[in-house]
């Protein structure tokens, strides 16, 4: 076809001349409002007519690719109303979507290439994780190519995307302690995170108000400590089977679960479950308020360390990911020397369980080993101290990245102790520059925590997390020189279609001209 005819066909497809349906613009590949934006997009003029795709092919001996193929098959059919078969990989890629792990030497493990031509799509990843990220890009291209009011995709843009993340750790944290969230709700959050290439979900499993994970050696942690939540309603907890189900669900989406047991403060639920964990052997009452900083484990008792060792070993045994988060924040009633002594022993227990210790930034007061990750949330001096101790830093500055902070003065949900975080403020910062003294090479990435003091159900979580989470996904993935608010907010405006289609009750901030 000569170029004139190709362009004519493109225009006809775009304007819907081949059907009587009303169409919104379909974009060329570089105009698709992808988030996070890929690091390289080269559009071509051809159009891919989805009817040409007859199968999804991959190495059938790779069970991970089989799972991806199955998931993509349902996605494709849901959006195109066309059946596609699954088949073993073949030399000929025509009329197929091929998924392939390929060694591009020296590339990031999440590196992928997405090539879309007139009659084939291929996704090549450095590892299966790379292929998965490429599949998510393809799925966004499909979702964002939906035409107004029309369920069925007919045509897709073509070209090549080459992409890899800036940071290896792009996380979200969910506080399931202040209010409990069911396995189904956590899975729904995981599904949404996966769309935006988030690859870690940190679960804040214990706090003053609730202990949320079954520990076989200490059953009262959940039978008593899991009973309630903020406000006094019924709480809940994950059985070990539930937790394993969450881990496996996340793993299939290339998301690693990071479990957190917050210690030595934020432990009232444990202290209300077992009298003997208290220094005075007096059992505490369950707590349903939202104050912080009033509880501490008894640092001088050997039993405390037996308890911690049981908890860390039972959870570590169910956690394939590398990290174990030991909290360590706001231990206001633990004297500093006791805090250090306690955290040093807990770090040793984490290491004995072959996990990498992670803690809120106060953890740097302890003798942290170099592998430790200090999660910067409050004090820049702690993040700097982490660097001095040759440890790594994860960026979660409360005044930029806390999803439970209100957007503005009229936001109903959330808190404001770290200030308001508009969609723009949440987007417009750079982890490598926020604290100038930090060595950017030791920043492992970014995490956006959501604390649930005021958040009771999934819609509340959605209202605070969306759309800001998309900004954190882009900060973690896309090179800073490719990011700017104007361009981002314009792309974000199209994501209402994705969020609406999934019934996500996002905050329709007036900073964005929602489509
Ligand atoms: C925290 O927000 N207390 C880590």
Image (cartoon, rainbow, N blue to C red):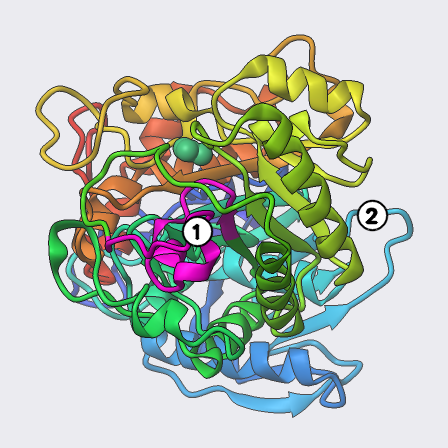
Check disc 1 and report the residue beneath it.
Answer: 278
Q: CA distance from mark 2 to mark 1?
A: 51 Å
Determine which quarter of the picture holds residue 376: top right
Residue 451, image x and y in percent?
32, 42
Check disc 2 and report the residue beneath it.
Answer: 107
For the point 66% across and 73% down, the residue is 317
- Considering the numbered disc 1 on the image, is that residue within a helix, a strand or a loop? loop
Q: Is residue 441 magenta?
A: no
Report the magenta residues as a range.
261-286
Dominant secondary structure of the residues highlighted in magenta in the image: loop
Residue 251, image x and y in percent?
58, 70
Which quarter of the rendered picture does the C terminus lie within?
top left
Find residue 341 and name its label.
none
* Horizontal relation, residue 286 to residue 471: left or right: left
Residue 141, image x and y in percent?
44, 55
Rendering quadrant holding ligand 1: top left
Query: Can residue 154 be seen in this snapshot?
Result: no
* Horizontal relation, residue 364 to residue 498: left or right: right
């Amino acid at each position: 076809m000569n170029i004139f005819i190709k362009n004519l066909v493109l225009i006809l497809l775009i304007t819907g001349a081949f059907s009587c349906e009303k169409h919104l613009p379909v974009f060329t590949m570089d105009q698709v409002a992808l988030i996070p934006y890929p690091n390289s997009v080269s559009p071509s003029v051809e159009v891919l007519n989805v009817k040409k795709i007859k199968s999804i092919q991959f190495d059938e001996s790779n069970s991970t690719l089989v799972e991806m193929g199955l998931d993509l098959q349902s996605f494709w059919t849901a959006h195109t109303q066309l059946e596609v078969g699954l088949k073993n990989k073949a030399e000929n890629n025509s009329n197929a979507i091929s998924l392939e792990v390929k060694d591009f030497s020296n590339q990031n493990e999440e590196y992928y290439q997405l090539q879309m031509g007139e009659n084939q799509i291929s996704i090549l990843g450095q590892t299966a994780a790379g292929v998965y990220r490429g599949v998510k890009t393809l799925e966004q291209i499909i979702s964002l190519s939906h035409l107004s009011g029309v369920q069925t995709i007919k045509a897709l843009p073509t070209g090549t995307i080459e992409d890899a993340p800036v940071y290896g750790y792009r996380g979200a944290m969910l506080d399931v302690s202040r209010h409990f969230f069911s396995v189904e709700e956590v899975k729904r959050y995981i599904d949404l995170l996966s769309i935006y290439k988030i690859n870690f979900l940190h679960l804040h499993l214990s706090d003053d108000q609730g202990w949320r994970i079954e520990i076989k050696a200490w059953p009262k942690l959940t039978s008593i400590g899991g009973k309630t939540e903020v406000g006094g309603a019924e709480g809940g907890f994950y059985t070990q089977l539930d937790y394993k189900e969450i881990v496996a669900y996340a793993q299939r989406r290339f998301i690693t679960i990071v479990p957190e047991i917050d210690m030595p403060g934020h432990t009232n639920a444990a202290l209300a479950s077992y009298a003997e964990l208290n220094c005075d052997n007096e059992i505490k009452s369950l707590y349903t308020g939202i104050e912080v900083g009033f509880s501490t484990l008894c640092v001088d008792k050997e039993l405390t360390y037996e308890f911690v060792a049981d908890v860390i070993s039972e959870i570590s045994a169910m956690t394939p990911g590398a990290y174990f988060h030991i909290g360590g924040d706001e231990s206001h009633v633990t004297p500093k020397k006791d805090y250090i002594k306690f955290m040093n022993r807990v770090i040793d227990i984490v290491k004995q369980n072959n996990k990498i210790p992670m803690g809120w930034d106060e953890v740097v007061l302890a003798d942290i080993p170099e592998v430790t990750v200090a999660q910067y949330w409050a004090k820049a001096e702690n993040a700097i101290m982490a660097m001095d101790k040759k440890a790594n830093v994860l960026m979660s500055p409360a005044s930029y990245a806390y999803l439970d902070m209100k957007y503005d003065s009229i936001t109903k949900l959330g808190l404001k102790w770290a200030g308001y975080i508009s969609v723009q403020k949440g987007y417009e910062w750079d982890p490598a520059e926020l604290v100038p003294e930090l060595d950017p090479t030791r920043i492992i990435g970014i995490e956006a925590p959501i604390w649930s003091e005021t958040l009771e159900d999934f819609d509340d979580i959605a209202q605070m997390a969306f759309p800001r989470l998309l900004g954190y996904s882009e900060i973690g993935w896309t090179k800073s020189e490719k990011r700017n608010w104007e361009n981002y907010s314009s792309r974000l405006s199209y994501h209402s279609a994705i969020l609406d289609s999934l019934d996500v009750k996002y905050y329709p901030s007036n900073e964005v001209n929602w489509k």
